Amino acid sequence: MKNWTETELKLTAPDGAALEAVGRDPLLTAAAEGEAETVEMRSSYYDLPDGSLRAAKLSLRFRTENGRGVVTVKRGVKKDKKTGKASRTEWEVEADSLADGLERLGAIPELAGLLPPAEALAETARVVFTRVERRTRFAGAEIALCLDRGWFESPEHPFFEAEAELAGGEQTALDELSAYLCGKYALTPEPRSKASRAAKLRARK
Protein backbone atom coordinates (compact mmCIF):
# COMPACT_ATOMS: atom_id res chain seq x y z
CA MET A 1 0.00 0.00 0.00
CA LYS A 2 1.31 3.44 -0.93
CA ASN A 3 0.37 6.91 0.29
CA TRP A 4 1.97 10.14 -0.84
CA THR A 5 1.39 13.70 -1.97
CA GLU A 6 1.90 13.93 -5.69
CA THR A 7 3.15 17.09 -7.37
CA GLU A 8 3.20 16.84 -11.12
CA LEU A 9 3.25 18.78 -14.33
CA LYS A 10 0.95 17.89 -17.23
CA LEU A 11 1.57 19.23 -20.74
CA THR A 12 -0.22 18.46 -24.01
CA ALA A 13 1.86 17.85 -27.13
CA PRO A 14 0.49 18.90 -30.53
CA ASP A 15 1.29 15.49 -32.05
CA GLY A 16 3.32 12.32 -31.65
CA ALA A 17 6.38 13.85 -33.31
CA ALA A 18 6.57 16.60 -30.68
CA LEU A 19 6.26 14.02 -27.91
CA GLU A 20 9.07 11.96 -29.40
CA ALA A 21 11.22 15.09 -29.62
CA VAL A 22 10.76 15.65 -25.89
CA GLY A 23 11.96 12.09 -25.31
CA ARG A 24 15.13 12.85 -27.28
CA ASP A 25 15.78 16.25 -25.68
CA PRO A 26 19.57 16.44 -25.15
CA LEU A 27 19.35 18.27 -21.82
CA LEU A 28 16.95 15.71 -20.33
CA THR A 29 18.59 12.62 -21.81
CA ALA A 30 22.05 13.72 -20.64
CA ALA A 31 20.76 13.86 -17.05
CA ALA A 32 18.70 10.66 -17.29
CA GLU A 33 19.16 7.89 -14.74
CA GLY A 34 18.84 4.32 -16.02
CA GLU A 35 16.82 3.01 -18.94
CA ALA A 36 13.35 4.11 -19.95
CA GLU A 37 10.47 1.81 -18.99
CA THR A 38 7.45 1.20 -21.22
CA VAL A 39 4.12 0.48 -19.52
CA GLU A 40 0.79 -0.36 -21.16
CA MET A 41 -1.97 1.37 -19.18
CA ARG A 42 -5.74 0.70 -19.17
CA SER A 43 -7.63 2.93 -16.75
CA SER A 44 -11.29 2.95 -15.72
CA TYR A 45 -12.67 5.67 -13.43
CA TYR A 46 -15.69 5.27 -11.15
CA ASP A 47 -18.21 7.35 -9.26
CA LEU A 48 -21.65 6.98 -7.71
CA PRO A 49 -24.56 7.77 -10.05
CA ASP A 50 -25.10 11.13 -8.35
CA GLY A 51 -21.45 12.13 -8.78
CA SER A 52 -20.87 12.45 -5.05
CA LEU A 53 -17.26 11.23 -5.14
CA ARG A 54 -16.36 13.94 -7.62
CA ALA A 55 -18.26 16.50 -5.55
CA ALA A 56 -16.16 15.47 -2.54
CA LYS A 57 -12.99 15.93 -4.66
CA LEU A 58 -12.29 12.20 -4.65
CA SER A 59 -11.11 10.35 -7.76
CA LEU A 60 -11.30 6.54 -7.91
CA ARG A 61 -9.46 4.52 -10.54
CA PHE A 62 -8.81 0.87 -11.38
CA ARG A 63 -5.84 0.53 -13.72
CA THR A 64 -3.84 -2.30 -15.18
CA GLU A 65 -0.14 -1.59 -15.72
CA ASN A 66 1.34 -4.27 -17.99
CA GLY A 67 -1.42 -6.51 -16.63
CA ARG A 68 -0.86 -5.69 -12.93
CA GLY A 69 -4.01 -4.35 -11.24
CA VAL A 70 -3.85 -1.17 -9.14
CA VAL A 71 -6.64 0.76 -7.41
CA THR A 72 -5.94 4.43 -6.69
CA VAL A 73 -7.80 7.10 -4.74
CA LYS A 74 -6.84 10.73 -5.22
CA ARG A 75 -8.12 13.38 -2.85
CA GLY A 76 -8.14 17.15 -3.25
CA VAL A 77 -6.18 19.00 -5.87
CA LYS A 78 -4.35 22.31 -6.19
CA LYS A 79 -3.86 23.40 -9.79
CA ASP A 80 -1.79 26.01 -11.53
CA LYS A 81 -3.47 26.57 -14.90
CA LYS A 82 -0.56 28.67 -16.14
CA THR A 83 2.07 25.92 -15.82
CA GLY A 84 -0.05 22.73 -15.72
CA LYS A 85 1.26 21.88 -12.25
CA ALA A 86 -1.00 20.09 -9.75
CA SER A 87 -0.70 18.63 -6.24
CA ARG A 88 -2.92 16.01 -4.58
CA THR A 89 -2.86 13.25 -1.99
CA GLU A 90 -2.93 9.67 -3.29
CA TRP A 91 -3.50 6.19 -1.85
CA GLU A 92 -2.72 3.15 -3.98
CA VAL A 93 -2.94 -0.63 -3.54
CA GLU A 94 -2.30 -3.58 -5.82
CA ALA A 95 -5.56 -5.41 -6.45
CA ASP A 96 -7.09 -8.02 -8.75
CA SER A 97 -10.34 -6.06 -9.00
CA LEU A 98 -12.00 -2.80 -8.01
CA ALA A 99 -13.83 -4.54 -5.15
CA ASP A 100 -10.60 -6.00 -3.81
CA GLY A 101 -8.89 -2.61 -3.85
CA LEU A 102 -11.81 -0.82 -2.22
CA GLU A 103 -11.82 -3.29 0.65
CA ARG A 104 -8.15 -2.65 1.35
CA LEU A 105 -8.38 1.12 0.91
CA GLY A 106 -11.41 1.30 3.20
CA ALA A 107 -9.21 0.18 6.09
CA ILE A 108 -7.15 3.39 5.86
CA PRO A 109 -8.24 5.83 8.60
CA GLU A 110 -8.23 8.85 6.27
CA LEU A 111 -10.59 7.05 3.86
CA ALA A 112 -12.82 5.31 6.39
CA GLY A 113 -16.47 5.68 5.41
CA LEU A 114 -15.70 7.63 2.23
CA LEU A 115 -15.59 4.79 -0.30
CA PRO A 116 -18.78 3.01 -1.38
CA PRO A 117 -18.94 -0.70 -2.30
CA ALA A 118 -17.96 -1.61 -5.84
CA GLU A 119 -21.49 -2.69 -6.79
CA ALA A 120 -22.81 0.82 -6.14
CA LEU A 121 -20.36 2.43 -8.55
CA ALA A 122 -20.54 3.08 -12.28
CA GLU A 123 -17.70 3.57 -14.75
CA THR A 124 -17.50 7.23 -15.75
CA ALA A 125 -14.48 7.26 -18.07
CA ARG A 126 -11.92 5.05 -19.78
CA VAL A 127 -8.38 5.90 -20.86
CA VAL A 128 -5.95 3.60 -22.69
CA PHE A 129 -2.36 4.62 -23.35
CA THR A 130 1.29 3.62 -23.58
CA ARG A 131 3.65 5.32 -21.15
CA VAL A 132 7.40 5.67 -21.55
CA GLU A 133 8.88 6.68 -18.20
CA ARG A 134 12.38 7.70 -17.24
CA ARG A 135 14.02 9.43 -14.28
CA THR A 136 16.00 12.56 -15.03
CA ARG A 137 17.20 15.74 -13.37
CA PHE A 138 16.26 19.31 -14.20
CA ALA A 139 16.97 22.58 -12.37
CA GLY A 140 18.42 20.65 -9.42
CA ALA A 141 15.37 18.42 -8.96
CA GLU A 142 14.79 14.72 -9.56
CA ILE A 143 11.89 14.18 -11.95
CA ALA A 144 9.99 11.17 -13.27
CA LEU A 145 9.29 12.12 -16.87
CA CYS A 146 6.41 10.23 -18.50
CA LEU A 147 5.52 10.43 -22.19
CA ASP A 148 1.95 9.20 -22.79
CA ARG A 149 0.20 8.47 -26.07
CA GLY A 150 -3.21 6.85 -26.29
CA TRP A 151 -6.92 7.65 -26.39
CA PHE A 152 -9.87 8.84 -24.34
CA GLU A 153 -12.95 6.58 -24.55
CA SER A 154 -12.11 5.31 -28.06
CA PRO A 155 -9.26 5.48 -30.60
CA GLU A 156 -11.14 8.29 -32.35
CA HIS A 157 -10.02 10.59 -29.51
CA PRO A 158 -6.21 10.34 -29.33
CA PHE A 159 -3.93 12.33 -27.06
CA PHE A 160 -0.21 13.01 -26.68
CA GLU A 161 0.94 14.17 -23.27
CA ALA A 162 4.03 14.70 -21.14
CA GLU A 163 3.81 14.32 -17.37
CA ALA A 164 6.63 15.23 -15.00
CA GLU A 165 6.31 14.15 -11.37
CA LEU A 166 8.54 15.70 -8.74
CA ALA A 167 10.56 12.93 -7.05
CA GLY A 168 12.91 15.19 -5.10
CA GLY A 169 13.84 18.86 -4.93
CA GLU A 170 11.97 22.14 -5.15
CA GLN A 171 8.60 22.54 -6.86
CA THR A 172 9.93 25.54 -8.77
CA ALA A 173 11.84 23.08 -10.95
CA LEU A 174 8.52 21.99 -12.47
CA ASP A 175 7.67 25.60 -13.30
CA GLU A 176 11.02 25.94 -15.07
CA LEU A 177 10.52 22.65 -16.88
CA SER A 178 7.07 23.77 -18.06
CA ALA A 179 8.51 26.96 -19.53
CA TYR A 180 11.36 25.01 -21.16
CA LEU A 181 9.20 22.36 -22.84
CA CYS A 182 6.46 24.77 -23.89
CA GLY A 183 8.98 27.15 -25.40
CA LYS A 184 11.05 24.51 -27.22
CA TYR A 185 8.44 21.96 -28.34
CA ALA A 186 5.17 23.94 -28.46
CA LEU A 187 3.66 21.96 -25.59
CA THR A 188 0.80 23.60 -23.69
CA PRO A 189 -0.09 23.38 -19.97
CA GLU A 190 -2.96 20.97 -19.29
CA PRO A 191 -4.71 21.59 -15.94
CA ARG A 192 -7.42 18.95 -16.59
CA SER A 193 -6.94 15.33 -15.56
CA LYS A 194 -7.18 12.48 -18.05
CA ALA A 195 -10.30 11.31 -16.20
CA SER A 196 -12.11 14.63 -16.55
CA ARG A 197 -11.39 14.88 -20.27
CA ALA A 198 -12.53 11.31 -20.94
CA ALA A 199 -15.67 11.80 -18.82
CA LYS A 200 -16.53 14.94 -20.77
CA LEU A 201 -16.32 13.01 -24.03
CA ARG A 202 -18.55 10.26 -22.64
CA ALA A 203 -21.13 12.80 -21.51
CA ARG A 204 -21.43 14.11 -25.08
CA LYS A 205 -22.53 10.72 -26.40
Image: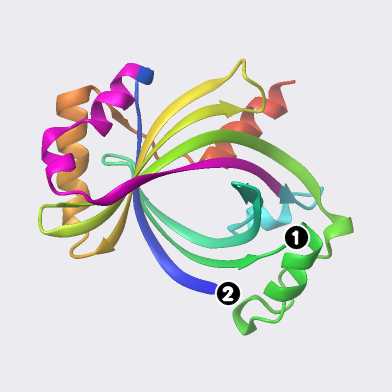
Percent coordinates x, y for residue 49 in the rendering: 82, 48
Residue range (magenta): 17-45
Percent coordinates x, y for residue 7 in the rendering: 35, 58
N-terminal of the two: label 2 or label 1?
2
Q: Is residue 86 above or below residue 76?
A: above
Q: Which residue is drawn at 75% across and 20% down?
A: 205
Q: Is mark 2 on a helix, strand or loop?
A: loop
Q: Callout 1 environment at 10 Å: few (<14), some (14 to 19), or many (20+)?
A: some
Three-letter residue code for mark 2 = Met
Q: What element carries label 1?
A: loop
Quadrant in the picture for residue 166: bottom left
The residues tagged by marks 2 and 1 sit, at their Cα atoms, a distance apart of: 14 Å
Q: Which mark is residue 96?
A: 1
Percent coordinates x, y for residue 170 in the rendering: 18, 63
In reply to whether residue 67 is colored magenta, the answer given is no
**Image position of 84 (left or right of 46):** left
Percent coordinates x, y for residue 52 in the rendering: 72, 56
Q: Residue at x 27, y 39 (%)?
A: 82
Task: Name the residue beneath numbered marker 2.
Answer: 1
**Image position of 162 (left or right of 138):** right
